[in-house]
Image (spheres, rainbow, N blue to C red):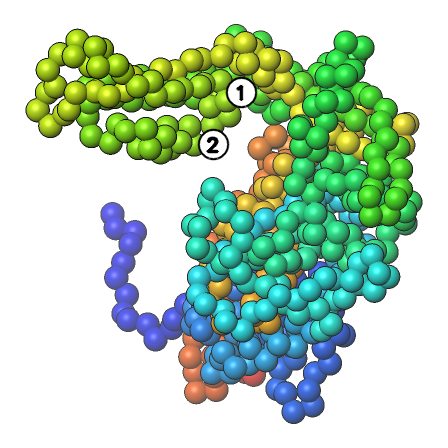
């Protein structure tokens, strides 16, 4: 028996509402459009407000990142024109560009207002912020991009919004994941972390040739100016560490927790190594917890901590900062460091042996100048190169005569390459394998074990930067105006907050007996669940009639946990019903 039948062709069409089924109600709860409109009043002659236009761009980025010139086509295919009430023909580059220009003049204020609204509405604690800068790459000349000077923090005047030019798009310092000639800026994110994960809540940009010290200095100035915290601990990685950063926080009555470059504290470690008392840390990675629960025979790694009171001096302010230095030892990192060193030693030794063989055979490019160049390339930036010394020893006439006849294309050798490996130097370095250091000005009531656990939550900041660059695709940016580039980057910060807030709301709502997988549901999973949800569009002489399709059980359950209205409920309130 047949249950599938062929019907006549239909004039009806469809659009894939998809993730907008959850993005639209979330942007409404975040009050994004209204916050923008409070800062950017609508031009009486404008047909659409800046809040409406810019919230549409945020939704487009969350749905599927597209260039501005393709937003109109996306809106038609997704039904965004229906939700935003904006005709497709009105979605053009000029209208988007004008809104981005306006947004630039109030970008810090708007971002902070959204952050404070989200913190209040969704009960996000801003007393502990993780900070991590990342680079954003650009391709093109950007000849109009210019250095913008200092932000003003430290002088009592923090430049922002229209008073602060866009970050200079320029060639930055060499990075492993960026071509040497590429241009960039740096974007830093402040992330609030709790039991439901991380939530990127605020951010800033700096020029491509600035470093982490400048980044966290300017970010802290903007946090003071806009978020106005009563209590604050800033947690960051070693690229942002300096005595000046600790002094600035202490002057405001706040605290810092930073990792620091090991070489800055190696002498302190050596001087106190004998009296350091080590305790095993309670923190374990997810993998290590799993191994212990399953009594796995694989290595069960752990961390050890030792605390030392110390005083740092800030040259700029002349302040003495009392702090605690937390030395960290990781058994896993020790194994990784030693394996990497042995591999580097073997590579260098093998390479020197080959060069010595070439020199002995009298092959081409085995003169001292060429060998020095080849050895330099072999050593590269490997720290293991410090364990090796070599020299080119000239051969006497008698030694040359004793050599066998040279092979074809070679000549009788004039030198002998000798090298020496210093095993004791390697043993001295092995003492530091697996060791790192944290510096904190937190009250002593917060013990080292608790602070170390907080610092390990820094991985949420790194993940946020990764999500910013992948699902939301903060680059490439197809804009030429540095002001519009800056505005779009800040708009993507709001999109990132929205992305993370979606999974946070869901995780807060799952029942206590939910599976571990359900408690760790991500925004990507939620958006993918609605990726195939469609609307049926019926065209009549009076206009379009929109018919919502039936939700799957999974979609309906997910909307229930999120506390969002269904597409049918949203459209029934937004659109008038066809008269009988």
Is 451 located above or below residue 289 in the figure? below
Is 191 located above or below residue 535 in the figure? above
Q: Which residue is drawn at 79% across and 26% down?
A: 325
Residue 98 at least partly seen = yes
Residue at the farthest left position: 408
Q: Distance between the residues labelled 1 and 2?
A: 15 Å
Near-viewer residue (487 or 244)? 244
Residue 227 at least partly seen = no
Q: Residues within 10 Å of mark 1 (few under 14, many from 20)?
A: some
Q: How crowded is mark 2: few (under 14 residues within 10 Å), some or many (20 or more)?
A: few
Callout 2: SS: loop
Q: Quadrant of the C terminus?
A: bottom right
Task: Decide if residue 146 is on the left or right side of residue 15.
Answer: right
Q: Which residue is drawn at 51% across and 25% down?
A: 383
**Place of residue 386 in the rendered image (x, y in percent of width and height, measured from the top left):** 50, 22
Task: Decide if residue 198 is on the left or right side of residue 156.
Answer: left
**Place of residue 411 in the rendered image (x, y in percent of width and height, measured from the top left):** 15, 24
Q: Which of marks 1 and 2 is nearer the N terminus?
A: 1
**Place of residue 284 in the rendered image (x, y in percent of width and height, measured from the top left):** 66, 21
Foreground disc of the pair 1, 2: 2
**Place of residue 164 in the rendered image (x, y in percent of width and height, measured from the top left):** 71, 68
Residue picked out by circle 2: 381
Q: Residue at x 88, y 33 (%)?
A: 322
Is 264 located above or below residue 16 in the figure? above
Residue at the farthest bottom position: 45
Near-viewer residue (504 or 432)? 432
Near-viewer residue (198 or 427)? 427
Callout 1: SS: helix
Q: Which residue is drawn at 21% across and 20% down?
A: 413
Residue 397 location, quadrant: top left
Q: Are marks 1 and 2 in contact (CB under 8 Å)?
A: no
Q: Which mark is residue 337?
A: 1
């Amino acid at each position: 028996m047949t249950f599938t039948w062929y019907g006549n062709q239909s004039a009806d069409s469809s659009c894939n509402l998809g993730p907008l089924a959850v993005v639209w109600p979330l942007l409404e709860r975040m009050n994004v459009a209204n916050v923008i409109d409070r800062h950017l009043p609508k031009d009486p002659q404008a047909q659409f407000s800046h809040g409406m236009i810019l919230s549409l761009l945020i939704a487009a980025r969350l749905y599927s990142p597209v260039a501005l010139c393709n937003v109109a086509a996306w809106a038609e295919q997704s039904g965004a024109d229906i939700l935003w009430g904006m005709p497709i023909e009105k979605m053009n580059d000029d209208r988007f560009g004008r809104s981005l220009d306006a947004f630039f003049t109030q970008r810090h204020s708007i971002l902070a207002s959204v952050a404070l609204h989200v913190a209040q509405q969704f009960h996000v604690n801003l007393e502990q912020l993780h900070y991590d800068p990342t680079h954003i790459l650009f391709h093109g000349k950007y000849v109009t991009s210019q250095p913008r000077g200092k932000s003003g923090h430290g002088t009592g005047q923090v430049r922002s919004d229209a008073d602060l030019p866009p970050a200079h798009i320029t060639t930055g310092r060499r990075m492993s994941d960026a071509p040497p000639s590429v241009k960039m800026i740096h974007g830093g994110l402040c992330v609030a972390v709790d039991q439901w994960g991380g939530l990127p809540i605020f951010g800033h940009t700096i020029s491509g040739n600035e470093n982490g010290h400048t980044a966290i200095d300017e970010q802290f100035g903007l946090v003071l100016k806009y978020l106005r915290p009563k209590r604050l601990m800033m947690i960051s990685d070693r690229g942002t560490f300096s005595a000046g950063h600790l002094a600035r926080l202490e002057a405001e009555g706040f605290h810092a927790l930073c990792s620091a470059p090991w070489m800055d504290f190696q002498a302190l470690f050596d001087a106190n190594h004998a009296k350091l008392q080590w305790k095993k840390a309670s923190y374990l990675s997810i993998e290590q917890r799993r191994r212990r629960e399953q009594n796995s025979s694989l290595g069960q790694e752990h961390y050890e901590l030792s605390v030392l009171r110390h005083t740092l001096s800030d040259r700029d302010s002349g302040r003495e900062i009392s702090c605690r230095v937390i030395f960290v030892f990781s058994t896993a990192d020790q194994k990784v460091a030693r394996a990497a060193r042995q591999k580097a030693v073997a590579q260098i030794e093998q390479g020197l042996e080959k060069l010595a063989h070439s020199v002995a055979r009298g092959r081409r490019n085995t003169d001292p100048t060429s060998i020095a160049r080849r050895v330099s390339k072999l050593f590269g930036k490997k720290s293991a190169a410090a364990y090796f010394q070599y020299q080119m020893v000239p051969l006497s006439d008698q030694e040359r005569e004793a050599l066998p006849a040279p092979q074809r294309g070679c000549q009788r050798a004039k030198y002998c390459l000798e090298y020496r490996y210093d095993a004791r130097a390697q043993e001295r370095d092995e003492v530091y394998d697996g060791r790192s250091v944290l510096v904190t000005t937190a009250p002593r009531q917060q013990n080292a074990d608790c602070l170390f656990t907080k610092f390990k939550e820094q991985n949420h900041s790194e993940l946020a930067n990764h999500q910013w660059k992948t699902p939301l695709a903060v680059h490439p940016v197809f804009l030429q105006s540095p002001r519009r580039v800056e505005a779009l980057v800040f708009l993507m910060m709001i999109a990132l907050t929205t992305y993370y807030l979606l999974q946070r709301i869901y995780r807060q709502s799952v029942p206590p007996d939910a599976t571990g997988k359900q408690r760790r549901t991500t925004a990507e999973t939620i958006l993918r669940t609605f990726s195939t949800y469609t609307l049926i569009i019926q065209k009549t002489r009076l206009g379009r009639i929109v018919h919502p399709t039936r939700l799957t059980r999974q979609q309906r359950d997910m909307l229930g946990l999120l506390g969002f209205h269904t597409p049918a409920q949203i459209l029934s309130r937004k659109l008038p019903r066809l008269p009988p």
